[in-house]
């Protein structure tokens, strides 16, 4: 099957998102679609799968014009999408999400037994056979939910499969499994559109790459005939320079000390120190307890034993409010449900944590608040029409920058980062790395969880590796490597 989009235009009110975009993908091809956050990638793919309607342009399938007005229209033509932002219904079971709207029936009644068996087959195919099909989807981790989304798309037997940041929350092992699935689909003649910001993945798995910039198509390249620098220049319109900025901070006194920390069944015996200006990376497989360390430090999970000290004084955050008051900030893994209030504006989200900084006598100084937010928008290069725009209207990467903005208004003593560059383009990542370095230079102690090992190695001073809820090792980032970290993460040390 070959799908071609020609002259696609799309605007939301006065904001033009796509203008005259051409894009095509053929069966047996993995075609990457790249661009900075806000370039229009997700919008273009949502038009292809019927979520949005184009204002102008055409779509053809095998040379014949089609009118895709809904996701059902797309599915009937063999087009399916795995969205960047998870769309599972949390109150339903995994199997109910997998077969929503097309449940197997017997004598007119939903056949739960068959649905459970078939769900198990599809979960097994994506390396998630350990997930109980009857389990409530909302109780799964972000990475597990992503695997369920992938299984759901594959169960449609799509001939064109759109993957929008499918590996953002997956571990190295799960990514390897996904790549094998993609290779098998490619061999069967399935066309795959791969939307990702991870350059290593693009050059490892894809055949071609198309780049959008500011809503326009700027070029297509064959992967074997191009390189990192050329793609970055197409995306941002300029040379990017060093991918990871140099770190020149000399750590100071111990700012955060953790000893024998345990929670209610996820982690136990955790102990480490982070100095002022130091970045402690945290690596490990999904489910190893990486995020749980941060949640316990921030008072989301209850600590059952252990000690936490800030600048030599004991603290026991019983909830996030107490953690914030103690000087701890947290950039969460799931910005959509945990990091932002989607119905509020960019301004309201950016000042939500420290609104009292702009108030006198219980009254907010709107001018001071607006000035501070405009400065943050400039510093972080948040692409928004204005500060009053609802944050849900921004692209995923720009939403992530707003999450960071919450903590830059009044930098904390300790900042916890859980997948801080998830879903952020290569230019945006560089900006976030500079922000991390700037915070470290100002004395903030940073604990950063990341599934991207090159990021952990480049941005950390030391790396704590987790395995099955316990810390397996702590390495000096300057002298270790990916193989040593993965060996520890899989219980090899």
Image (spheres, rainbow, N blue to C red):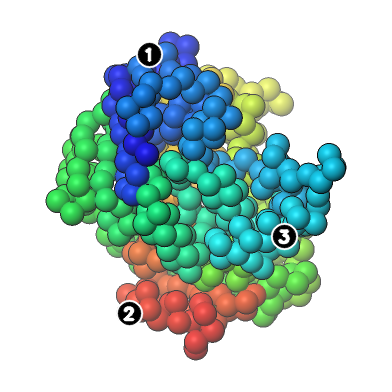
For residue 366, which quarter of the picture? top right
Q: Residue under circle 1?
A: 56
| Nearer-N-terminus badge (2/1) | 1
The residue labelled by disc 2 is: 479
SS for dot 1: strand
Q: Secondary structure at mark 2?
A: loop
Q: Residues within 10 Å of mark 3 (few under 14, many from 20)?
A: few
Which dot, 3 or 1, sits closer to the camera?
3
Q: Which residue is mark 3?
A: 117
Q: Is residue 11 left or right of residue 233?
A: right
* Label 3 – label 1 distance at C-alpha: 44 Å
Give the farthest residue toward the top: 14
**First of labels 2, 3 by sequence position:** 3
| Disc 1 packing (10 Å; few <14; some 14–19; many ≥20) | some
Residue 130 pos. (x, y %): 66, 68
Image vertical order of residue 456 relative to residue 102, above or below:
below
């Amino acid at each position: 099957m070959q799908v071609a989009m020609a002259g696609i235009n799309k605007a939301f009110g006065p904001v033009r998102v796509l203008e005259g975009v051409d894009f095509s993908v053929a069966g047996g091809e993995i075609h990457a679609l790249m661009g900075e956050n806000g370039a229009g990638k997700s919008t273009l793919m949502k038009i292809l799968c019927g979520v949005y309607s184009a204002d102008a342009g055409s779509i053809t399938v095998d040379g014949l014009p089609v009118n895709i007005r809904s996701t059902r229209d797309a599915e009937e033509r063999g087009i399916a999408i795995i969205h960047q932002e998870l769309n599972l219904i949390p109150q339903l079971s995994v199997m109910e999400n997998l077969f929503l709207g097309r449940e197997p029936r017997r004598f007119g009644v939903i056949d739960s037994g068959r649905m459970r068996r078939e769900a198990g087959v599809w979960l097994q195919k994506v390396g998630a056979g350990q997930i109980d099909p009857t389990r409530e989807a909302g109780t799964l981790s972000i990475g597990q939910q992503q695997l369920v989304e992938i299984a759901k798309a594959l169960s449609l037997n799509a001939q064109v499969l759109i993957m929008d940041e499918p590996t953002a929350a997956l571990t190295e092992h799960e990514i390897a499994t996904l790549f094998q699935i993609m290779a098998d689909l490619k061999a069967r003649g399935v066309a795959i559109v791969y939307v990702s910001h991870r350059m290593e993945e693009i050059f490892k798995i894809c055949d071609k790459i198309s780049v959008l910039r500011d809503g326009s198509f700027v070029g297509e390249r064959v992967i074997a005939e191009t390189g990192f620098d050329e793609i970055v220049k197409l995306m941002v319109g300029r040379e990017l320079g060093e991918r990871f900025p140099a770190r020149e901070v000399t750590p100071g006194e111990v700012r955060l000390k953790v000893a024998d920390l345990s929670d209610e069944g996820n982690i136990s015996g955790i102990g480490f120190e982070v100095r002022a200006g130091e970045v402690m990376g945290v690596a490990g497989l999904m489910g190893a307890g990486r995020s749980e360390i941060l949640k316990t430090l921030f008072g989301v999970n209850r600590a059952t034993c252990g000690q936490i000290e800030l600048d030599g004084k004991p603290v026991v955050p019983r909830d996030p409010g107490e953690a914030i008051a103690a000087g701890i900030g947290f950039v969460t893994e799931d910005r959509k449900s945990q990091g932002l209030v989607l119905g509020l504006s960019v301004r309201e989200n950016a000042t939500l944590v420290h609104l009292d900084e702009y108030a006198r006598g219980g009254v907010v100084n709107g001018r001071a608040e607006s000035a501070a937010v405009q400065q943050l928008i400039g510093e972080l290069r948040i692409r928004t029409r204005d500060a009053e725009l609802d944050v849900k209207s921004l692209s995923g990467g720009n939403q992530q920058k707003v999450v960071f903005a919450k903590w830059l208004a009044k930098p904390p003593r300790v900042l916890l980062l859980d997948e801080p560059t998830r879903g952020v383009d290569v230019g945006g990542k560089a900006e976030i790395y500079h922000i991390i370095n700037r915070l470290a230079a100002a004395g903030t102690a940073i604990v950063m969880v990341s599934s991207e090992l090159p990021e952990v190695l480049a941005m950390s001073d030391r790396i704590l590796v987790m395995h099955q809820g316990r810390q397996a090792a702590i390495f000096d980032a300057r002298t270790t490597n990916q193989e040593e970290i993965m060996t520890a993460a899989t219980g090899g040390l």
